[in-house]
Amino acid sequence: MDQRSGCPINLSVELFGDKWTLVVLRDIMFGNLRTYGELHANSLEGIATNILADRLKRLTAARLLTAAPDPAHKQRTIYSLTDEAIALVPVMAQLGAWGVKHLPAVSPQLAARAIALEDGGPAMWRDFEAELRWLHRGAAKPDRSVLAELDAAYRAAEGAGRAQ
């Protein structure tokens, strides 16, 4: 990869600075979507097939994802977050919190997870990282399911939205 400088912010922007990379990581991280088909079918933003394929290749080459054949389906690949990707949990939490506070078009239902993650703070982020290491890296199952808590926050906000 050609780089403009060795500045860590520049290098991070070169890796994550396009329209789709963080969205793909978000869907794997928060949606537990693990295959190309799941990622494409559940894309809120409607990612094109060629863009999704390219981002998965880039993220694998950057060692943020691993790709392994699905033992249950020969033509399917299962993508897993690496430890480097899991370390992005605090960054993703802060991006979500910033968006909730500063962007007017944020959906209340979709904001619910970001709000819960911000309210939970670093302790929740660490627990989420532990859960992701269990789901993606084969670590021991943690006692707490942050994904279940985030899903409950979303469902509560969805129910509140329908009641209005």
Image: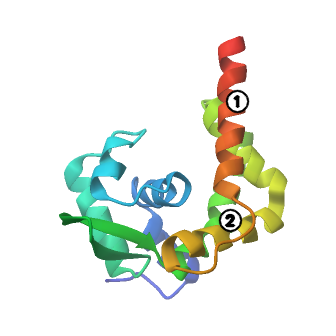
Residue placed furthest toward the top = 164
Q: How is the image coloured?
A: rainbow
Q: Which mark is residue 157?
A: 1
Q: Quadrant of residue 142?
A: bottom right
Q: Residue at left 43%, top 38%?
A: 44
Q: Nearer the viewer, residue 60 or 71?
A: 71
Q: Quadrant of the N terminus?
A: bottom left
The answer to whether residue 99 shows anywhere in this view is no
Q: Nearer the viewer, residue 45 or 144?
A: 144
The secondary structure type at the circle numbered 2 is helix
Residue 140, image x and y in percent? 63, 79
Residue 135, image x and y in percent? 53, 69
Q: Can you say whether 42 is above or below 53 in the image? A: above
Horizontally, residue 164 falls left or right of residue 64, namely right
- Going by the numbered disc 2, the residue's amino acid type is Phe
Q: Nearer the viewer, residue 34 or 142?
A: 142
What residue sits right under mark 2 in the picture?
128
Mark 2 packing: few (<14 Cα in 10 Å), some, or many (20+)?
many
Q: Residue at left 69%, top 66%?
A: 90
Q: Can you say whether 41 is above or below 64 in the image? A: above
The secondary structure type at the circle numbered 1 is helix
